[in-house]
Image: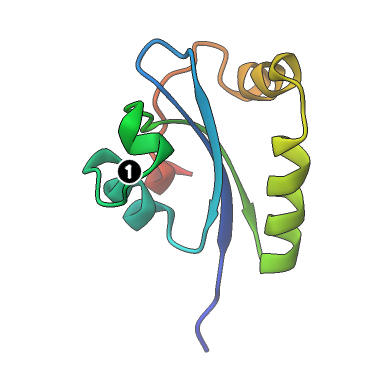
Amino acid sequence: MKIHLYYVYILTTKNNKMLYIGVTNDIVRRLWEHKNGINEGFTKKYSIHKLVYFEVFDYIDLAIAREKQIKGYSRAKKDKLVTDSNPEWNELDPKKR
């Protein structure tokens, strides 16, 4: 039986000025897509591909609800969420969880 995991993640630019919140079932693949500009859109246009935060869920509905919750946060609250777990805003490696 295959175990499915779902990720809510926050990406930022090199200088941490812009944020992107997303959800995926394969964070390694999704980060590769962001870094290589595979999909047209916001992250490609503004070079947003530095992973600074992520959470793991067993159920997609919980992950989607959390993504929506974070998207509704103020910028200050999003910044605090990242800073509380990653004070230096270092780029994270999701394989080293």
For disc 1, the marked residue is 34
| Picture residue at 57% right of the left edge, 13% below the top | 87
Query: Where is 92 relative to 68, above or below?
Result: above
List the single residue furthest toward the bottom.
1
Q: Residue 27: x percent and y percent? A: 43, 53
Residue 85 left/right relative to 70: left
List the single residue furthest toward the left.
36
Q: Amino acid at mark 1?
A: His
Residue 4 left/right relative to 74: left
Q: Can residue 59 be seen here?
A: no
Q: Determine the image quadrant of residue 60.
A: bottom right
In the image, 32 versus 3, the foreground residue is 32
| Picture residue at 42% right of the left edge, 36% below the top | 42
Q: Residue 57: x percent and y percent? A: 66, 58
Q: Can residue 41 be seen here?
A: yes
In the image, 46 versus 3, the foreground residue is 46
Name the element at disc 1: helix
In the image, 51 versus 76, the foreground residue is 76
Residue 20 left/right relative to 58: left
